[in-house]
Image: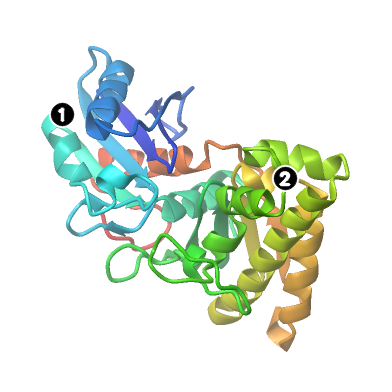
Amino acid sequence: MTVLALDIGATKFAAATVDSDGVAGDPRRIAVPESGVWDACRALLTDVAGDARISAVGIGSAGPVDVGAGVCGPLNIPEWAEGFPIVDAVRKLFPEAEIRFAIDGVCLVLAEQRFGAARGVPNVLAMTVSSGIGGGIISDDRVVMGRTGNGGHVGHIVVPGQDEPCACGGFGCVEAVASGKSSVRWARRQGWTGTTGVELAAAAHAGEPIAVAALERAGTAIGTAVASAAALLDTDLVVIGGGFAQSGEPLWGALRTAAAAHARLKYLRGLRVVPSELTDQATLQGAAILALGAANAGETPRGRMSP
């Protein structure tokens, strides 16, 4: 029997088989289409599964989610933004499979604790900074899921002094200010002519003033949010991954400066904010951990976590 992992991102899907140690194999990726989203996702899963009998599937999705209902509603996938019954859809595709479903941040923090920069750490916040911003929490060695499964969704911490409208309907959320997409939009309003976060990071490293300002603005917002979250959670470790988090010192210098400026309580003096040791497969790897737990008679990874 074969175990699968599925990562539902803001702009791409990734899927892979999972080995007996809970490690995702080489993933296959596709861009999220503007329409026919489930058709594309189903084709990817079918392609990865091949002729194998599927015993378990772990799903990590951009949020928000409703884990109890098995519904994902990624804000950046318009066709699914009001909610798509992903668990039922996957169950119909693989009727024999046990399915575990979580927001991508939960998958991220599971992967970081087992394989990454938070190995063995009982209290950690893991964040992803990419097209969007998400996160997951392990507190006292227990995964924090929350009422609907959205625990750790730190992208919607509000940054003081910011009024950027957010896809959630609010404004000033750190995702609206500091994600890769948001930073590109801000830079273009200032006259920069590039189109992607990768181009923005390259321009910043080349010393282009608008690009440098955009990354520093993003880093300051993220660092401020990190300090707020660390104070709330009483954690001394924050791990940050994701494509835009790899933008280098213009982002990270401002991030660390802002975090240090705001994390002034005595119990936060040892706060460490470190880059992820995992690649852009972190969410997929966390989904693999979920899947292996489902395959192994309902085990749940490191702590009591809702299936």
Q: Which residue appears at 50% of the width and 63% of the height?
A: 155
Q: Which residue appears at 28% of the width and 71% of the height?
A: 147
**261 and 93: which one is in front?**
261
Looking at numbered disc 1 in the image, what kind of residue is underneath it?
Leu
Q: Secondary structure at mark 1?
A: helix
Mark 2 vs mark 1, CA separation in Å = 45 Å
Looking at numbered disc 2 in the image, what kind of residue is underneath it?
Trp
| Residue 192: assigned label | 2
8 over 163 or under it: above or below: above
Residue 30 falls in which quadrant of the image? top left
Is 193 positioned to the left or the right of 233 in the image?
Answer: right
Task: Identify the residue at the far top of this view.
Answer: 51
Task: Identify the residue at the far bottom of this view.
Answer: 266
Quadrant the N terminus occupies: top left
**79 and 129: which one is in front?**
79
Please name which of the two marks, 2 or 1, marks the residue nearer to the observer: 2
Residue 195 in sight from this viewpoint: yes
Q: In x, y percent, where is residue 40?
A: 28, 26
